[in-house]
Image (cartoon, rainbow, N blue to C red):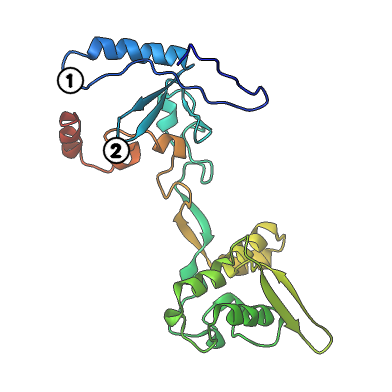
Amino acid sequence: SLSDNINLKKNIKHTIEIVVDRLVVKEGIKDRLTSSIELALKVGNGLVIIDEIGKQEHLYSEYFSCPQCDISFEELQPRAFSFNSPFGACSTCDGLGTKVSIDPELVVPDMNKSLIQGCVEPIGEQPRGNWYSSILKSLAFHYDFNFTTPWKNMTEEVRKVILYGTHPDKKITMSYQSEKFKGEYKGKFEGIIPNLQRRYNQTKSGNMRDWIEKYMAIQNCPDCIGARLKPASLAVTIDKQNICELTQNTVGALNLFFNNIK
């Protein structure tokens, strides 16, 4: 209780929760509930916890932020829902909803071919005695795949590693051997698609850009998935639907939707 002596260490961050009221959900508690919520928000500096006894706790904030996720939002305004405004447009695609990027279907145009037949077109037939071949051999040893296996028969994990690389935190032993040099190191594999994208962004060679563009296509933005808005704007929902999902409905369907909101 509040009358007890509470010793707090000044160098440790403490969470202090105060019970403002206990209520049973029933008719006629609106005024008392409102007063209790207002008091709790005042005492809690804008935060209030609703504890459903025997179920779960719900944390609410009167500010545009979440203390648990460390996320904050600007005050909601119409411009936040417009992809023509920098306040609402997805920062990755600038509100276009699409990006020109490496297309996996152009990188592997024929899934019936194997690596030894050149199914991954940018690197050609593998292995063929170069540095890339040594890396792929190391991957084959680590992930247990064969160069003669058709691409369509490879596991999803193997195809993902070859195209997109290994996990940043996962290092594997890479071995390399030639007539003049032999060695090994532990590291990550960049992946065919990130490698092409990086070289495209960094190169100043027109020929190199033309070559890489053969494997590029207009695709949905990887962040907004074609919705064209920032995540904060898409997080605002009406009856669990955001503005992008709502605008995909017909006028008649929207009329029914808004009339039936409880």
Give residue 197's position: percent from left, percent from top: 61, 61
Q: Nearer the viewer, residue 211 or 154?
A: 154
Which of the image's four quarters has the C terminus?
Answer: top left
Disc sitting over residue 200 in the figure: none
The answer to whether any part of residue 111 appears in the image is no
Which of the image's four quarters has the N terminus?
Answer: top left
Asked which quadrant contains residue 189, the reply is: bottom right
Q: Nearer the viewer, mark 2 or mark 1?
A: 1
Looking at the image, how many numbered discs can be counted on the residues? 2
Disc sitting over residue 240 in the figure: 2
Give residue 142's position: percent from left, percent from top: 60, 78
Q: Nearer the viewer, residue 48 or 159?
A: 48
Classed neighbour count for the residue bearing mark 2: other residues with Cα under 10 Å, few (<14), some (14–19), many (≥20):
few
Residue assigned mark 1: 26
Left or right side of 186 for 140: left
Q: Which secondary structure, mark 2?
A: loop
